[in-house]
Structure formats: C-alpha cells, structure tokens
Image: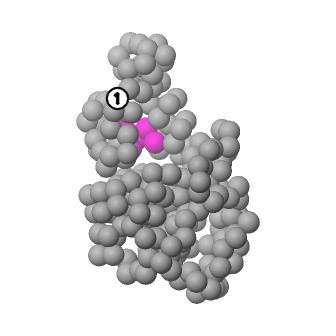
Amino acid sequence: MLDWNRIDSVFLDMDGTLLDLHFDNHFWLDHVPQRFAEKHGLTKQQALDELVPRFRSIEGTINWYCVDHWSRELGLDIALLKEEVQHLIQVHPFVIDFLQQLAEQGKRRVLVTNAHQKSLDLKMKNTPLAGLLDNIISAHQLGLPKEEVEFWKKLSTLESYTPERTLLIDDNLTALSSAKEFGIGYLMAIYKPDSKADIKDVGTFEAIHSFQEIMP
C-alpha cells in the first residue's frame, strides 16, 4: 500500500486518527449539551437544538477548534468539562506499535493537529503518545487550520520537511484535500475515526481500518 523507501516524514492527526474520536463526539454532542442544559434550565434536546447550529456555523475554522472561544461563547469552562470525561480518551489499536516501528525505520513522527493546546495537553497527559513523537504541532501556533492550503506552507517554519516525501494520515477529508493541493506526496484517510460509529465515506482517498495494515 505504501512505498516506505520514498517516505521520510509521517504527519499524524490526533483526534480520530491516533485517538478514538468517540471522546470528542461524546463531549460535544452529549456532555456539553448536558452541562449547558443544566445551566440554562433546558432539556438536553433543547440545548442540542441551540448548540449544533452554532457549532456548524464556524466548522473548519480555527475558532471551531478553540477551547477558549467556546468557553467564552457558551459560558462554560470547556477545559474543565473535558477533564470530567477524560476517562474516555483512548488510543486506537496498533497506534503504539506503528509509532515504534516508524522510529526503528528512522522515519520522523510529527503530530499535526487542529486541537487547541489545552485539549492537546489533556490528551498527552492521558496517553503515552508524547514520548513516541518527534514533534507536536498545533494549528493554533500558526493561526490557521489544516483545512487551508496556506497551513502546509507555514508549517515549514515549525517543521522542516519535503512535501513529496511526506505521508499525512488524517480522518479530516478537507485537511487531506488541502494537503494534496499543496503537494504532500502520500495521503491516507481513516475508515473508523469513532470506534462507536459507522465506517466513514472517505471519497477517493486511500484509507485504513487499522494501523496494522501499513506497518513499515
């Protein structure tokens, strides 16, 4: 599936790629609406009806991923609420083995995430990932989400890489599309970002069910 001899750097998304997206889906569609409902005397469904359109209105922008933005918007301490359900943070199967294999093969392992630093810190604290990565980059450091082509250009200020010798693995199809437009040589999607949800339609992108399929 991949010619590892042609790949030097592996860019890895976090939520839905290395980590089970169930945590994030549960948090935004269950936990936050519940806490919002309690605060405003609403039913959970009323809270969802109010929140989901607000979420979607800025989907894919840097603010959509910003913990501080939503704390201000919703009047809730989002970082604190995440800690309430941190037991749901789980690494996808074979991820640890895959990252160890990459190191043994001399490949550079770079986490490239849209997640806000507060989310990133919580997830690094609750998983062994930090010790298995050569660099950790949040889109908030660049002020642009991965959905924008300019992100991949600006990324070189934080991580030196050769686009045509780089593999990006991501469950975000818009991010994969922008990386393709920029010239990232190898692209891989994820069929099941959320272990509790159905298989995702990945369009024309190659995809994996598990990292076991592409062990170098």
Q: Is residue 180 above or below residue 61?
A: below
Decide whether residue 80 is among the magenta residues. yes
The residue identified by callout 1 is 54
Residue at screen point 43% across, 38% down: 81
- Residue range in magenta is 77-82
Q: Amino acid at mark 1?
A: Arg
Q: Secondary structure at mark 1?
A: helix
Residue at screen point 31% across, 30% down: 74
Could you tell me which quadrant the C terminus lies in?
Answer: bottom right
Res. 117 image quadrant: bottom left
Magenta stretch: dominant secondary structure: helix
Disc 1 crowd rating (10 Å Cα; few below 14, some 14-19, many 20+) is: some
Q: Is residue 142 above or below residue 46?
A: below
Residue at screen point 55% across, 36% down: 26
Residue at screen point 39% across, 33% down: 56
Residue 143 point in image, percent of width and height: 26, 58
Q: Is residue 78 above or below residue 118?
A: above
Residue 106 point in image, percent of width and height: 58, 87
Could you tell me which quadrant the N terminus lies in?
Answer: bottom right
Left or right: 108 as drawn, with respect to 64: right
Residue 172 point in image, percent of width and height: 50, 51
Say whether residue 141 is visible. Answer: no
Q: Depth check: give the residue in front, 115 or 183.
A: 183
Left or right: 1 as drawn, with respect to 27: right
Decide whether residue 35 is among the magenta residues. no
Left or right: 8 as drawn, with respect to 146: right
Say whether residue 155 is visible. Answer: yes
